[in-house]
């Protein structure tokens, strides 16, 4: 985290200097460093600063040092709480390949040259936040369980973000799900289809996540915008 953010701040400062921008910067602890200092991966002081800011520059989080502490104190819990507290439900993940890097890809240049896709991932619902969750004992053995849950409004708001972005790009949207097995993604698919009526200019398709993973390697340029839930966009 500190190493990544430190270099990003250098870039930010260079951009500000180049375009004569004045940006007020502040720092706050989050994750493992925050746990070490205050016993909480997301202290209230950090959350207050985040709420007051116009933007947050956030690096990576976590590490083996904190793998053995109680789950609700691990660094990743601070990140999840930050997302939910600030209602950061839409994660935009662009994948653009610059020509100079085409030969550096593990895929053939003709497969990836000119790649420009955008993955829209729902970030505050689904299995990461669903209840109940935990580990309990049943019939003499431990059982781990998580709940993958989305309500209609959560699907609609991320779907609308994806449709709007598709309208601004190539007007193609692929919704990634596992509707043949999971009822939660069956609902996801239904809501996306319903939303598509408001965006008749967008060509909508659906793809199971296992096939989507293969297609992203086989022929990634067939996609423009992809939208999916918290689990599949990770």
Image: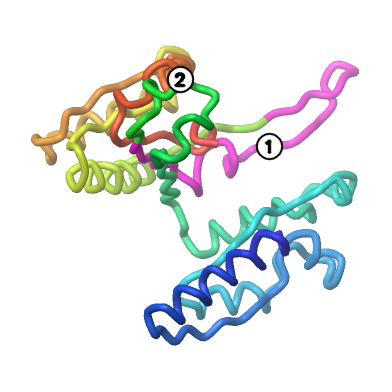
194 to the left or right of 110: left
Compare residues 181 and 229 and report the one nearer the observer.
229
- Please name the residue that numbered disc 1 is placed on: 133
Using residue 53 as the reference point, say whether residue 204 is left or right of it: left
Residue beneath the point at 45% across and 79% down: 16
The image quarter containing residue 221 is top left
Q: Residue at x 44, y 32 (%)?
A: 102
Asked whether 134 falls inside the magenta stretch, the response is: yes
Question: Residue most toward the left?
Answer: 200
So how many labels did they put on this image? 2
Q: Is residue 107 left or right of residue 171?
A: right
Residue 103 is a magenta residue: no
Using the numbered discs, state the Cα–Cα distance from disc 2 to disc 1 in whole angstroms: 42 Å
Locate the C terminus and report the quarter of the image it occupies. top right
Confirm whether residue 49 shows in the render. Answer: yes
Q: Is residue 223 left or right of residue 141?
A: left
Q: 137 or 149, which is in the foreground?
A: 149
Residue 95 sits in quarter? top left
Q: Quadrant of the N terminus?
A: bottom right
- SS state under label 1: loop
To which residue does mark 2 refer? 108
User: Residue 63: x, y in percent?
Assistant: 80, 49
Where residue 23 appears, x then y in whole percent? 47, 83
Disc 2, SS: loop
Q: Quadrant of residue 36?
A: bottom right
Looking at the image, which residue is at 70% across and 51% down? Answer: 76
Q: Give the extent of the magenta segment.
A: 116-145
Tell me if residue 133 comes above or below residue 57 in the rendering: above
Q: Give the percent coordinates (x, y) of residue 5.
A: 64, 64
Precedes in sequence: disc 2 or disc 1: 2
């Amino acid at each position: 985290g500190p190493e990544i953010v430190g270099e990003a701040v250098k870039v930010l400062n260079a951009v500000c200097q180049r375009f004569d921008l004045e940006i007020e910067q502040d720092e706050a602890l989050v994750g493992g460093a925050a746990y070490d200092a205050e016993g909480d991966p997301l202290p209230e002081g950090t959350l207050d600063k985040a709420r007051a800011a116009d933007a947050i520059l956030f690096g990576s989080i976590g590490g083996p040092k904190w793998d053995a502490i109680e789950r609700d104190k691990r660094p990743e819990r601070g990140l999840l709480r930050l997302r939910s507290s600030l209602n950061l439900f839409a994660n935009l993940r662009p994948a653009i390949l610059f020509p100079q890097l085409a030969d550096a890809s593990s895929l053939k240049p003709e497969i990836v040259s000119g790649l420009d896709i955008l993955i829209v991932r729902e970030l505050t619902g689904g299995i990461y936040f669903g209840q109940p969750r935990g580990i309990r004992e049943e019939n003499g053995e431990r059982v781990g369980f998580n709940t993958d849950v989305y309500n209609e409004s959560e699907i609609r708001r991320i779907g609308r973000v994806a449709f709007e972005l598709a309208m601004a790009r190539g007007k193609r949207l692929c919704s990634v799900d596992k509707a043949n097995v999971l009822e939660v993604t069956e609902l996801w698919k239904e809501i996306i289809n319903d939303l598509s009526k408001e965006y008749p200019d967008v060509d909508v398709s659906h793809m199971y996540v296992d096939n989507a993973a293969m297609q992203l390697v086989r022929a990634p340029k067939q996609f423009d915008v992809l939208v999916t839930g918290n689990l599949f966009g990770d």
